[in-house]
Amino acid sequence: MEERLPDAGPKAPGTKEKTEEPIARFLVSSSPHVHEGIRIRSVMGLVIVALLPASVFSIYLFGLPALFTILVSVASAAGFEWLWQKVVRRPGTAGDLSAVLTGLLLALNLPAGSPWWLILVGNLFAIVVAKQLYGGIGYNIFNPALVGRVVLLVAFPVHMTSRWISPSAWGMDAVTTATPLGRAREALLATGSVDAALTRNEAIDLLIGNRAGSLGEVSVILLLIGGIFLLAKRVITWHAPVAFIGSVWAMAGIFHLANPARFADPSFHVLTGGLFLGAFFMATDYVTTPLAPAGKIVFGIGCGVVTVVIRLFGSYPEGVSFGILLMNAFTPLIDRAFKPAVFGARRAKTA
Amino acid sequence: MKTLVLIIVSAVFVNNFVLNRFLGICPFLGVSKRVSTALGMSAAVVFVMTMASAATWLVYEYLLVPFDLVYLQTVTFILVIASLVQLVETALLKMSPALYKALGIYLPLITTNCAVLGVAVLNVQKQYDLVETTVFGFGAAVGFGLAMLIFSGIRERIELCDTPVPFRGTAIGLVTAGLLSLAFWGFTGLVKM
Amino acid sequence: MKSGTFFGGVHPRYEKDLAGGRPIETMPLPARLVVPFAQNLGAAPKPVVKKGDEVKRGQLIAEPQGFVSVPLHAPTSGVVQAIDVFPHPVGADLPAVVIVPDGKDEWAPGLNVERDAGDLGADALRGVIRDAGLVGMGGAAFPTHVKLSPPKDKPIDVLVLNGAECEPYLTADHRLMAERPAEIVEGASWFAKALGVENVIVAVEKNKPDAIAAMRPAAEARGYAVRALDVVYPQGAERQLIFALTGRRVPAGGLPMDVGVLVQNVGTCYAAFEAVRRNRPLTERVVCVTGRGVANPKNVLARIGTTFGDAIAFCGGLREDAGKIIGGGPMMGVAQYSLDAPVTKGTSGIVVLTRREAVQYAGDPCIRCGRCLRACPMLLNPSVLSVYAERLRFDETAAHHVLDCIECGCCAYVCPSRRPMVHHFRRAKAEIRKKQARAV
Amino acid sequence: MVAAIIALSALALVASFGLAMVARAFAVPVDPKVEEIEGALPGANCGGCGLPGCSELARRIAEGRADVDACPVGGESVARSISRIMGVAFAGGGARKTALVFCAGDDETARRRFYYNGVKDCASAALLFGGDKLCGYGCLGLGTCAGVCPFGAIEMSALGLPVIDPSKCTACNKCVLACPKKIIKLVPVSRRVHILCSSHDKGAKVRKACSVGCIACTKCVKEAPEGAIAMQDNLAVASGVPEIPDSVAAVCPMNTIRVVDLGISAPADAAGAAAEGAAS
C-alpha cells in the first residue's frame, strides 16, 4: 500500500519502435508532496494500546472467561470484516485495525463468560450491519461496537444484564452477582430508596474496579490512564469526555440534591457503569461523533443527559450505550449546526 | 400539568410514533432526503396532527357518542382528516409555493397517513379529554418530526457514503431506521403510560 | 495577539540543513535556456522575437498584455533557436522561447548601469519596476507593480518583507537575507517610497538566526523592524503572516490591501534593488536545489530559463532513488514530470524527493478524525470539503468556502487516510470558476 | 342507520362546503400541459437536457422556452407525444445515436509520461499537466465518464478504456460534457466505421506516444469515397456523408480506423452491399 511507485514503466508498445529508456520516470501528484507519516492503522493502534491496561486488568479480575471473550470478539470482528470484503469484492481494510478495535471495544462491553455465540452475533451486527452496509470505515453512522452491544442487550437481556460474575482472580469461584447500578436499582424498587451505604463505602472499590460489570468498565483508574494517554498523544480531544462526564455529574447532582433518598450521589453515578469507557473510547470515536469542538461538547452533554435520564427513570439500569448511540444519530445535525467560520470572515473572537 | 408534560415526553421519546409504534413510515422514508424538506414536512404534520386530534375528538364526543354512532369512528375520522389535509394543501399552494413544491405529493400522503388516524384512535382509546388530546396529537407530531429530522440528517450523510450498490437508497434507509429505533429503545419504561 | 502566530498550521520536517549552510553559487550559463512566456499571474506577455533572432541580455522578448502583466527579457545574449511548447513548472505545457547562449553574456545597450535613483518619484519607481518585469518571487508570481498601485480608498500603512520562508527544504530566501541584507533592505525602501509607507517590518522565522542577525543592522539603519516569528507552517502565507505580525484579519475573499498591508518577498526586494539601482531587468534569481534525491544540494544564482535538469546537474545530478521533482517547496510546489521544465521568475526551489520521502496518496475514506480541521490555517472544514468534492458535489464545496482555501497543504499533510485533499480542492475550485464564468 | 346516514352526510356537506370556500379563496392557476408533458417525459431526472429535472423541462416546454424534442433521452417517440400535447407539428428526429470514445490508446498501446498519484478522476488528473498520457489528447482512463453515466452504459475495460454499451446508451450527452479531454462524441448507431483517435500531433510524435494513433498518413483518405474522410490538422476526421466503407479499416497502418459494431447495424452481407452502394 505504502510503496506503490511502480519500478517498471507501462509496457512499451509492441510495434517496430525502438524503445529508449522508459518515458515515465517521476511521480506526479498535487501538492503537498510530503506527509507527517500517520496512517489510519497507527491511530487505531494507539487506541488499542490505550485500552490494554483495562483489558489486561479485566483478565486478572475475571480470569480465563474474560480472556476468552476478548479473543473470540477480536477474532470474529476481524473475521467478519475480512469475509464481507471477500464477498462484496472490495479492497480489504482488515489491516487498518479498526475492526480489531471494534471487537475489543465490544468485548469490553460484555460480561465475562459470555457464550461464544453471543459474541459472534454481537460482532456480526457491529461489523456487517453497522459498519460494512454503510460502506465500511469512515461511513458508519452509529458506533459499531455499541450497535453490537445494544442489539445483544435488547435481544438477549438475560445474558447481558443478570449474569455478572463478581471479580475473583482467575474466576475460580465465580459467583453470580449484580452490578452496583443494578443493585442500586433493586434497592430502590424494593425499599423506595437507594442504599446510602452502598453508594458511599464502595467508592474505592469502584475506582480500582473491584466490582461486577462488563469486562472493560470496571476499572475507572485504568480507563482514565488510557484516556489521558490518548489525550497526550492528541488522538482524541478533551471536549466530548469532559462534557459527558461533567454533565452526568451535574445532572445526577441536581437530582441527588432534590431527593437524596431516591437518587444516588453524583460521584456514584460518575464512577459506576460504563461511563469512563464510553466517554473516553466511544464518545470520541471519530466517525460517529461531531467534527467541530463545539459540536463535540454538545454531543457530550447530550450523552450525559440521556445516560442519567435512563439510569434514573428508564427500565434499563445503564444508559451510556443508549446515550451515545442516540447522540450518534444527532451527529449529522450537530455537524450542520457547528460549521467552523472561515478565517477573515468577520468575527469578534480572537485567538 | 404534570400529566401533560408526561404525555409529551412519552409521545416524543418513549413511544415515538415512527421509531416505536412504526406509524407513518411512508413519509418518514419518502420526505427525509433533505433536512430542509424534512423540516417542512414536520411542520405540516405538526399542524395537521394537532388539528386532527382536536377535530376528531370533537366529532367523537359531540356527534358519535351522543347519537350512539361509535361504530362509525374510523369512517368519520378519515373523512375529517382528509378534508383537513385538503384544506392545508390548498392554503399552502397559495401561501408558500416553495414549501408546496418541496412537499409535493407527500401532503396528500398525510391524508391516508396511519400516524394521523392512529393518533385520533389512540386518543379515544386512552380516554383523554380535549386538552390532553390536543397535547398528545401535538407531542406525537413533534416526535414524528424529531425522528424525521434526525433521519434526514443521517440520510444526507449516507448519500456521501460508499454504500454497496444493492443497499443504496431505501434499503440502507430502512437499516438506519432500525438502528435508530434501537437507540430510542433505551427510553423504554421511562414513562409508564 | 502579538506573539507571532496564527490559527492551525503544522510542523513538518524542515530539512533546511540540506542546503541552508551553503552560500549562493553563481551557475555557469547552460547550453540552452527555455524561457516560457507565462511567468506572471494574469495575462502572459506577447512574444516580440522570432526564430533566428539575435538577442542581448535584458532585451525585451515579450511585451505585456494589459495592466496585470509584465514584460519578459532575454536572460543572456544569444540566438533564438525555437519557439515551442515546453513543460512549465506551474503544471502545464506552455509555449516558451529557446535561447542558445553565445557565451558573451552581453547586456543590451543602456542596461546594467548604476544610477542614483534618489530623485525617482512614486510613479517613476512603479514604471521602473514594471519595465524590469518584476513579479512576486515567493512563488505566486503576481506582478509587483500592480501590488504597488493600490486603489485610493485602500491606503497601505504597513509594508511587510516576507522572509519567513516557511516551506520545508527551501533556503533561497534564507541565504539571500544572510548574504545580501543591505540590498534587500534598499530594495524594500523603494517599495516603501512608491507607497509612501513608513512602517516596514521584516518577518523572519526563528529557525534562521544568521539571517535575522544579518538583516537586523541593515533594517534598523533605516528604521525598519525585524520580527522573529514562531516556526509554524504556513507562517509565510500572506494572511497568516499579516495576522501574526499585526493582528489584522484579511477578510475572506479579500486582499491584504483591504487591511492596509502589503507583503513582498525578500527576493522581490532584491530584484527591485537590481532594477532600480543597477537598471537590470529580472533575468536571474536564487534557486534552492535541494532534497535527498540531489547529490549535492546548493543554493544557486541561475538564469531564468535554466532547465531543472541543468540546475540539478550543476548540483551533482540526481541520486538513484530520486522519485519526485518539485518546482517550489514540498508543501505547495508543483511536481514535474520532466527535467526540461525551466526555472521561472517564481521558482524559489527545485526539491528532489526520494521515492520513500514522497507521499503516496491512498485516498482512503475520511474517518473524520478532525486533524485537518485543527491544521487548517483558514479555519475551513477540509474533511467535509473533500468528501463533497470526491462525490462531485461542487455546489456544496462552494457553500463550505472552498474558494477561501489557500492550498497550503496542511490538511493533506496530517491526513491519516492519505486523502489528496488539495487536489480535490483544486478540482472543486476549477469547477466552481467554470460555473461562475458560464453564469456571467 | 338513519342517524348514521344523516350524520355522515352532514359531516361530508360541512367538509365539502369548507373545502370549496378555501379552494375559491386560495385559487392558483396551473397550466395542465405541464403535468401532461411531465408524464410524457422519461422521468429519469438525468439532467441530460441541462435542466435540473424532468419537471423543469416540462415547465419550459409548456411555456415555449424549450423545444419539444429537448429531451435527448426520450428520442423521437417522446418528442412526438410532446408535440401532440403542445399541438405543434413535429418535424421528425434524426437517427438514434450513441456515445463513442474517440481514442484507442489503452494501457498496452499508449505510453505514459509520469506516474500519476491522486484523485481517481479524469478531470482532476487533467489538472496536472493535462494528464499522464504522453499523448496530450488521449483518454486518461480513470472512468469519470463511467461515473457520470446515469444509465450504467459505460464500463472501464481491464486495459483502462471506457467501453460504452450502445444498447444502454441514451445519448444523454453527460459523458461528452464530463470528459476533460473531449474525446467522447455522439454518433449514429448505424455508422460502422470509426476513426478512433483525437490527436492533432504530428505523425512522429504520435508514433512515440501511442501505437494506435492517427499519424496522418492519408491512406484512408485515398481509399475512402470522395469527401468521406478529411485531414484536419494531422487527424483524419469522418465527415459522416458519405459513409466510410468497411474496407477502409484494412488500409489504416496504425489500426486506428476500425469497424465498430454498435449493435443495430446491418448484418455482414447487407453491410457489404451498403458499402458497395456507398462506394458507387
Image (cartoon, rainbow, N blue to C red):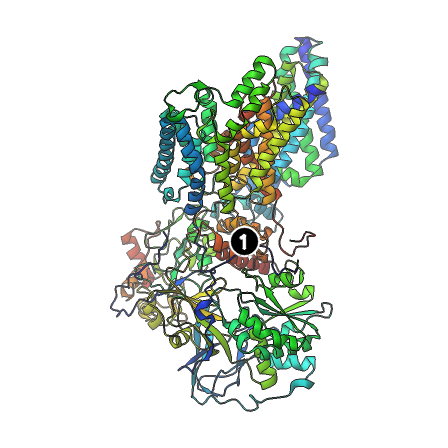
On the image, the x and y values in percent for residue D235 come to: 38, 68
- Residue C354 drawn above or below residue A231: below
Dot 1 falls on a residue whose secondary structure is: helix
On the image, the x and y values in percent for residue B167 come to: 44, 36
- Residue C77 drawn above or below residue A123: below
Chain holding disc 1: C
Q: Residues within 10 Å of mark 1 (few under 14, many from 20)?
A: many
What residue do we see at 58% from left, 86% from top?
A: C278
What residue do we see at 47% from left, 48% from top?
A: D75
On the image, the x and y values in percent for residue B71 come to: 62, 11
Q: How many marks?
A: 1
User: If the image is split into quadrants, where does the N terminus of chain C sit?
Assistant: bottom right
What residue do we see at 53% from left, 38% from top?
A: B155
Please tell me which residue lies in front, C337 or B105: C337
Left/right of residue A351 with respect to residue A97 in the rendered view: right
Q: Tell me the kind of residue under disc 1.
A: Ala
Task: Residue B69: tell me if it is visible.
Answer: yes
Which residue is tagged 1?
C375
Residue lying farthest to the bottom in this orientation = C109
